[in-house]
Amino acid sequence: MDNNILKNLPLKIIIETKKTLKKAISANRALAKLNGVAKIIPNQNILINSLVLQEAKDSSEIENIITTHDELFRANLDISDITNETKEVQHYRQALLKGFEFVKSNKLLLKKYIIEIQQELEQNDAGIRKQSGTVLKNAKTGKVVFTPPQNYETIQNLLDNLEQYINDENEIDPLINMAIIHYQFESIHPFYDGNGRTGRIINILYLILKNLLDIPILYLSRYIIQNKSDYYRLLQEVRTKENLEEWILYMLDGVEQTSLETIELIGGIDLLMNETKEKIKTRLPKMYSKDLVEILFMHPYTKIEFLVDGLNITRQTASKYLIKLEEIGLIKPIQIKNSKFFINSALFDILKKGMG
Ligand SMILES: Nc1ncnc2c1ncn2[C@@H]1O[C@H](COP(=O)(O)OP(=O)(O)O)[C@@H](O)[C@H]1O
Ligand SMILES: [Mg+2]
């Protein structure tokens, strides 16, 4: 049986209330500040690397896919023997980065990209639901709280409508739109699995599409984890009570809080990068280069190949560099399986702390 409750966008309810508009101003301000602050880091890949991984970790954790920072960082280094959870988080990261490339190069966030993003995330090509039976249950009671549309054509039509809403211009504040789009996407629930995570990737991509963010560094999922029961409750109340205002306020608050936290985190990384730079400049002046500092911050773990490739030096020279850097206390050696790595502990600690 098809469920006719879900209507096409735009919604007919008034969404720009005094409260949502007021909150939208402060959320936009925080986000704009974050977007500006990010530019103080000389190589944007440093932030993309660490913050996308963090968003991947937290967004997966909402779905009870749990991993640790250390394991995640190590997984990035191609050392086998990682858990399935960590693999899933890696796929999330790839899916987000793939989406980022789509939006950057096409300036559109099309349905077909969303399908590819979910495919990358889930590593299968099941695509849009064709079989009925998918329902949303309350995690505690097991009671069905919502039956998303079951008919393939209905789902496709709703997605076409959503695609249009995402890509067309309208008068509504983009952050408020992001909240509406997330509600609508989760309610369509177009896939057998991965809807929550794909929807949260869409949030970030939408902000990039609307030019509020240049790179995918807002990690909203941290806020959602910290306020998880409200997330489920408010998604549901949009449907049962037409309580759209509270849902919008929740998402706007999420943007504001995580923007402010990310600004702090970036400040910490910036400070540490400058200290590292000064230390190399004074203690190892012949070795100093901007690129060397960046390599040490590209990933909390460094290995000889990163220096060889990044600085165009021989293994021998690279090895000498690493010993010197260790001597002045910037990195610590660590043996993982058969490979030797060097950890930038100060960076590791900032990321771990900032990422909660
Ligand atoms: N009552 C609800 N109404 C609409 N969407 C909901 C509701 N409850 C949960 N959701 C969404 O469904 C997601 C879970 O769907 P699922 O396909 O299992 O995603 P994932 O595999 O990423 O966990 C949640 O993260 C949330 O976004
Ligand atoms: Mg799931």
Image: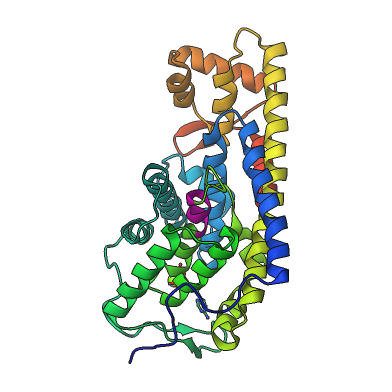
The residue closer to the viewer here, 37 or 303, is: 37
Query: Magenta stretch containing residue 196, yes or no?
Result: no
**Residue 99 vs residue 157, the one in the foreground:** 157
Question: How many numbered discs?
Answer: 0
- Name the residue located 51 percent from the left edge and 76 percent from the top edge: 11
Residue occupying image coordinates x 65% and y 63%: 252
Q: x, y (%) of residue 7?
A: 44, 80
* Residue at image point 30% right, 84% down: 132
Q: Residue furthest front?
A: 171
Asked whether 107 or 261 is in front, the reply is: 107
Residue 245 position in % (x across, y down): 65, 75
Q: Position of residue 209 (x, y in %)?
A: 47, 50
Question: In this picture, which residue range is highlighted in magenta?
Answer: 203-209
Query: Can you say which quadrant of the picture contains the N terminus?
Result: bottom left
Residue 201 visible in the shown view: yes
Q: Is residue 211 left or right of residue 253?
A: left
Q: Looking at the figure, which quarter contains the C terminus?
A: bottom right
Residue farthest to the top? 286
Residue pictured at 62% horizontal, 73% vertical: 247
Residue 142 versus residue 125 in the image, above or below: below
Q: Which image quadrant is residue 192 in?
A: bottom left
Horizontal side, residue 1 vs residue 90: left or right? left
